[in-house]
């Protein structure tokens, strides 16, 4: 807040009081200084209110005190910017509530006031001009006139080119300050989000703002730059300079700097270069070019210009293809490459005896003579005519694998597991291999494993294939895997071969006693060598791994011995048993594997010695019996003798007390013979566990044994088709080697008796069936010839005398639009009398299309005829649009010839064509007319 002198508080209008001064001075009101008459001062804009403008006006005389000699006042003080201190001859700035602004919109650049000085003694007035110059302050920043700046440049623009001049004139930044404060210069600032922009562009002439390219552009690497441009004024003190920024967006346009590239392109790491590309094609020998052209190349030969965004689009160059070089040298006799479409054409049939392969180099270049072509290789394989099915080197294969093998293990060809089982399938269409020679070409066959596909798989390529394990196998669950394999070349399939894989035992099972412990009584009158108890342990392993050796570890006190082979415990020689003695025998059963691989288990036998007793129960020789019986075994057959012994030689009675609810078996009560009473069916029950007792009729004189019966398979079931798979078998006409559908048959028999083989009983020349029941066409079908086939599929099992089941599979042939409509006549002739009625139907056209689908559409093909004739597109009715006058026709035969066409609904086939001749018939519509209205002649008088 300004503290004003008290004399200023009276307001802006000064009152001049004239008093008589006895000492008159004629110099009063004149300037007391030399120099120009006007007082000129300068102040900064935006100066504070009360700023001193003039410290001393230096006017002679006194305007204050008791005897003033002059009176001072201001005139022309517009907007009252100036305040006068008349007594002290000072001028102050008055900017109360406002700002002294030199810049637009106020534009106060100077203030001029006139100071009237009245000489109070003489009354004269002298005018003094005071000019206040407003000096500019750098209080405005440069301001860009556009919110955004943008420029497009081609990537081929040379370095050093000025690419943008949009900051010139009033398009760039403006600064309303004056002098250097309002002068603009431009610089490029670093953009942290686009650091390349600061290195790529520059403004060498800062006052013009012209942006210059400093580094080469590459559209393929960067398509847009965001250049931060700073505008700053040129205030003398750099610290006071003000700035503003804008972003210049530079879009890089694609230029023609790259050549074509073949597709598909696999890029080399961290480059734009493609790995070398090889196209492949194959064609059977002696093929008629008309059947195969254009040749199918995989992938399709195709190249694109790497400059994909050249603008305008009509300036983009095209691609021209050619064969640069090839082997053998006479390749040009056989192949031609379309230079526009890159389609490969066969020119003549190839004899494989002379040419088995062509290696060509394909070139793609732009049609504007761009010097950067692209190259790719094309390998063409000439195939032997596919008229022979694949075959295996052997009819059967025997493999071996140990049950402890991990997943991925290769099946071996011998027990010692040293060499893999080699499976070789060949195709004479690819290479004929004489006996005793080694094949050199992979026939690239598909080998199908037709059963146990969850357990085994076969390597997918190579001349020699190998079976590998897909999931763990367990010999105790299944010791042999027998299945078939077949090889297919996509058209023909080999005769199946049988593969048998035997699972070799690994010692992965421990001998197991039937009970954790046993309790048995012996008597003092038992003789040495007499049986005490028969122990039996089972081990699912085979050979030595399953051979069990028994021994008493402890507790026998020398009174008992055990047979290490049979497990029978007997009284030791020379032993006398005493009443009341008890024994706890620890018995171990171990297998006979290698010592470091042996497995064992133990049981405890508790023995108590009793007085002599004639009531001991009968005893079976074995605690458990295991045997197999065929499901074809006849009724009444004796299966097993379960005879027990009784010390007292009492009669023994035998019974089956459990495990046979259907009474399939019986046992002779007095002899212990086990007899088959009812037929066996392995598919319903494959195992029986019978509990059999032997009793001598006395209390507590009953013993038991277990009989484990495994039912083995015979081929007594026919294959059965699964009707769920039989759904809507359809196939498009005109396509060969196309999947139609799949049938599925099962056979509950085991092993090869349950393995299914498929064959066709009819239409073998049109269809084929694979080993998994998939049906394919062998040739293209024609729906118009036959639209349904009832295919007889035969499923047979793998037994020596196989059982068969036949299924009729309906296959419907779907229509393909492969026929053009055909008119009932190739030429129609119709007569129309002249002076006909307009719109009358003159002819009924009719065309038929052997294909299914929408109706035929009729059209007039001859453009000139459409002025006089019209055809109903649905009905084919041809009508005449105008009345025709025979006498006005200039044709010699007074007729019209027009071509009509019939187009099918799909529109993909050429239309059917016919010619229509419309003859105009003359009618008697004119009376005879004399050529002259008057005829004159002369007749002689004597005529």
Image: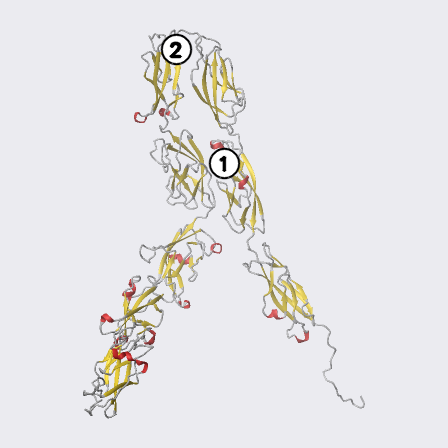
Q: Quadrant of the N terminus?
A: bottom left
Decide: few, some or many residues near mark 2? Use Cα within 10 Å; few <14, some 14-19, many ≥20. many
Quadrant of residue 597 in the image? top left
Nearer the observer, 71 or 910:
71
Q: Position of residue 712 (x, y in %)?
A: 48, 26
Q: Residue at x 81, y 90 (%)?
A: 942
Nearer the observer, 822 or 226:
226
Quadrant of residue 138 in the image? bottom left
How far apart marks 1 and 2 lie (CA) works out to 59 Å
Q: Is residue 927 left or right of residue 394?
A: right
Residue 723 against residue 933 in the figure, above or below: above
Residue to which mark 2 is pinned = 522
Is residue 214 visible in this depiction of the protein?
A: no
Circles 1 and 2: CB distance less than 8 Å?
no
Residue to which mark 1 is pinned = 756
Is residue 299 visible in this depiction of the protein?
A: yes
Q: Position of residue 550 (x, y in %)?
A: 35, 19
Residue 240 against residue 582 in the figure, above or below: below
Q: Quadrant of the C terminus?
A: bottom right
Of marks 1 and 2, which one's residue comes earlier in the chain?
Answer: 2
């Amino acid at each position: 807040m300004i503290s004003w002198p008290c004399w200023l508080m009276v307001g802006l209008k000064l009152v001049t009081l004239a008093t008589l001064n006895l000492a008159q001075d004629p110099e009063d009101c004149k300037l007391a200084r030399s120099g120009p008459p006007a007082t000129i001062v300068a102040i900064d804009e935006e100066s504070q209110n009360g700023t001193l403008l003039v410290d001393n006006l230096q006017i002679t005389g006194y305007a204050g005190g008791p005897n003033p000699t002059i009176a001072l006042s201001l005139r022309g003080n517009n907007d009252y910017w100036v305040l006068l201190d008349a007594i002290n001859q000072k001028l102050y700035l008055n900017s109360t509530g406002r700002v002294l602004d030199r810049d637009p919109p106020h534009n106060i650049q100077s203030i001029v006031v006139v100071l009237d000085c009245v000489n109070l003694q003489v009354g004269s007035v002298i005018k003094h001009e005071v000019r206040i110059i407003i000096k500019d302050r750098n209080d405005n920043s440069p301001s860009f006139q556009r919110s955004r700046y943008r420029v497009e440049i081609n990537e081929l623009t040379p370095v050093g080119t000025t690419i943008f001049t949009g900051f010139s004139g009033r398009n760039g930044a403006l600064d309303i300050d004056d002098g250097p404060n309002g002068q603009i210069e431009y610089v490029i600032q670093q953009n942290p989000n686009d650091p390349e922009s600061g290195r790529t562009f520059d403004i060498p002439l800062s006052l013009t703002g012209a942006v210059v390219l400093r580094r080469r552009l590459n559209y393929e690497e960067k398509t847009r730059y965001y250049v931060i441009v700073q505008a700053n004024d040129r205030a003398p003190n750099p610290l006071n300079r003000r700035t503003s920024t804008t972003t210049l967006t530079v879009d890089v346009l694609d230029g023609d700097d790259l050549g074509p590239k073949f597709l598909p392109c696999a890029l080399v790491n961290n480059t734009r270069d493609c790995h070398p590309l090889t196209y492949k094609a194959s064609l059977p020998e002696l093929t008629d070019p008309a059947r195969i052209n254009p040749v199918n190349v995989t992938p399709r030969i195709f190249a694109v210009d790497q400059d994909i965004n050249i603008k305008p689009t009509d300036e983009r160059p095209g691609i021209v293809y050619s064969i640069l070089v090839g082997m053998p040298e006479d390749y040009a006799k056989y192949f031609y490459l379309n230079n526009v479409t890159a389609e490969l054409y066969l020119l003549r049939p190839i004899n494989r005896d002379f040419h088995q392969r062509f290696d060509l180099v394909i070139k793609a270049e732009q049609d504007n003579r761009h010097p950067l072509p692209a190259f790719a290789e094309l390998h063409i394989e000439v195939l032997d005519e596919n008229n022979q099915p694949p075959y295996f080197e052997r009819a059967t294969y025997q493999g071996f694998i140990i049950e402890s093998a991990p997943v991925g293990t290769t099946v071996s060809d011998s027990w010692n597991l040293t060499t893999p089982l080699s499976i070789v399938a060949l195709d004479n269409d690819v290479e004929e291999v004489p006996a005793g020679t080694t094949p050199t070409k992979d026939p690239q066959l598909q080998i199908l494993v037709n059963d146990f596909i969850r357990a085994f798989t076969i390597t997918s390529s190579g001349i020699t294939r190998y079976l590998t394990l897909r999931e763990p196998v367990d010999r105790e669950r299944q010791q042999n895997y027998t299945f078939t394999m077949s090889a297919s070349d996509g058209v023909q399939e080999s005769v199946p071969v049988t593969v048998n894989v035997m699972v070799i035992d690994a010692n992965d099972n421990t001998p197991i006693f039937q009970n954790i412990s046993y309790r048995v009584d012996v008597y003092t009158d038992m003789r040495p060598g007499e049986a005490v108890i028969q122990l039996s342990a089972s081990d699912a392993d085979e050979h030595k791994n399953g051979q069990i050796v028994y021994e008493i570890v402890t507790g026998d006190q020398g009174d008992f011995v055990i047979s290490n082979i049979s497990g029978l415990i007997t009284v030791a020689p020379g032993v006398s048993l005493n009443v009341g003695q008890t024994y706890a025998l620890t018995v171990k059963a171990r297998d006979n594997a290698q010592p470091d691989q042996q497995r064992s288990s133990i049981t405890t036998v508790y023995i108590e010695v009793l007085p002599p007793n004639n009531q001991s129960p009968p005893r079976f020789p074995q605690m458990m019996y295991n045997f197999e019986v065929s499901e074809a075994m006849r009724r009444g057959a004796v299966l097993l003798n379960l005879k027990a012994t009784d010390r007292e030689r009492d009669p023994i009675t035998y019974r089956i007390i459990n495990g046979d609810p259907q009474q399939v078996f019986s046992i002779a009560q007095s002899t212990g013979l086990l007899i088959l009473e009812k037929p066996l069916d392995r598919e319903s029950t494959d195992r029986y566990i019978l509990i059999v007792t032997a009793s001598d009729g006395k209390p507590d004189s009953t013993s038991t044994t277990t009989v484990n019966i495994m039912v083995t398979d015979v081929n007594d079931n026919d294959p059965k088709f699964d009707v769920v798979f039989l759904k809507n078998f359809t196939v498009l006409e005109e396509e060969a080697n196309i999947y139609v559908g799949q049938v599925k048959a099962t056979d509950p028999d085991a092993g090869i008796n349950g393995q299914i083989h498929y064959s066709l009983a009819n239409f073998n020349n049109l269809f084929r069936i694979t080993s998994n029941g998939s049906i394919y066409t062998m040739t293209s079908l024609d729906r118009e010839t036959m639209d349904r086939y009832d295919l007889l599929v035969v499923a047979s099992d793998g037994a020596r005398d196989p059982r068969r089941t036949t299924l009729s599979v309906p296959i419907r042939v779907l229509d393909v639009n492969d026929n053009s409509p055909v008119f009932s006549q190739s030429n129609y002739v119709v007569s129309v009398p002249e002076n006909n009625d307009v719109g009358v139907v003159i002819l009924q056209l009719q065309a038929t299309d052997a294909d299914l689908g929408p109706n035929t559409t009729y059209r007039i093909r001859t453009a000139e005829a459409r002025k006089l004739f019209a055809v109903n597109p649905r009905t084919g009715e041809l009508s005449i649009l105008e009345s025709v006058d025979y006498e006005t026709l200039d044709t010699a035969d007074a007729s019209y010839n027009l071509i009509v066409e019939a187009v099918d609904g799909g529109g993909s086939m050429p239309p059917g064509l016919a010619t229509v001749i419309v003859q105009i018939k003359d009618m008697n519509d004119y009376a005879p007319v004399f050529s002259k209205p008057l005829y004159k002649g002369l007749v002689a008088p004597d005529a």
